[in-house]
Image (tube, helix red, strand yellow):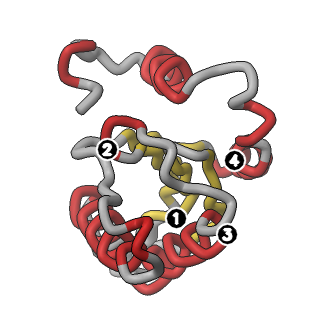
Amino acid sequence: MSQSLSQVYVHITFSTKNREPLMDDDIQPRLFEYLGGICNKLECQSLQVGGHDDHVHILCQLAKKITQIKLMEEVKKSSSKWIKTIDEKYRNFYWQNGYGIFSVNPSETNVVINYIRNQKEHHQKISFQDEFRAFLKKYQVEYDERYVWD
């Protein structure tokens, strides 16, 4: 085949360092827009970005010319630098070292979009840690609890 074709959707989630609730209502809309813009700049079309006080979710289409680790490095580094310039209260803002990135069936992107849109309601019932553990279980990812939370 002379043409390279790809359609890989990924659901990304990561938290603030130590799951500090630093993403208040003042910054969330702007931060989510900024995160989506980083993805788009890297040709990873952003479909939905959202989250809660201590973590984010991103649904995007992974470009065929970027690795997962490069995407995550750029998203986290750029957004962390940016948020610190917004207001003095964000000067100690950091993301956790790790992240979760999970494949999404193209026919289920609407399910993930709705899931991300409803984060505030969702997290009235469940913590980020329990949510993340559920993802790990769903995707059958083996992990050591000692190294998941930094």
Kind of residue at badge 1: Gln
Q: Residue furthest front?
A: 88
Packing grade of label 1 (10 A; few <14, some 14-19, many >=20) is many
Q: Find residue 4 and report its image quarter.
A: bottom left
Packing grade of label 3 (10 A; few <14, some 14-19, many >=20) is some
* First of labels 3, 4 by sequence position: 3
Residue marked by disc 2: 17
37 or 10, which is in the foreground? 37
Picture quarter with the C terminus = top left
Dot in front, 2 or 4: 2
Mark sitting on residue 116:
4
Residue plotted at (46% across, 77% down): 87
Question: Under tag 1, what secondary structure?
Answer: strand
Kind of residue at badge 3: Pro
Mark sitting on residue 29:
3
Against 140, is 22 above or below?
below
Q: Find residue 143 and report its image quarter.
A: top left
* First of labels 2, 4 by sequence position: 2
Mark sitting on residue 61:
1
Residue 54 percent coordinates (x, y): 50, 43
Residue plotted at (46% across, 74% down): 39
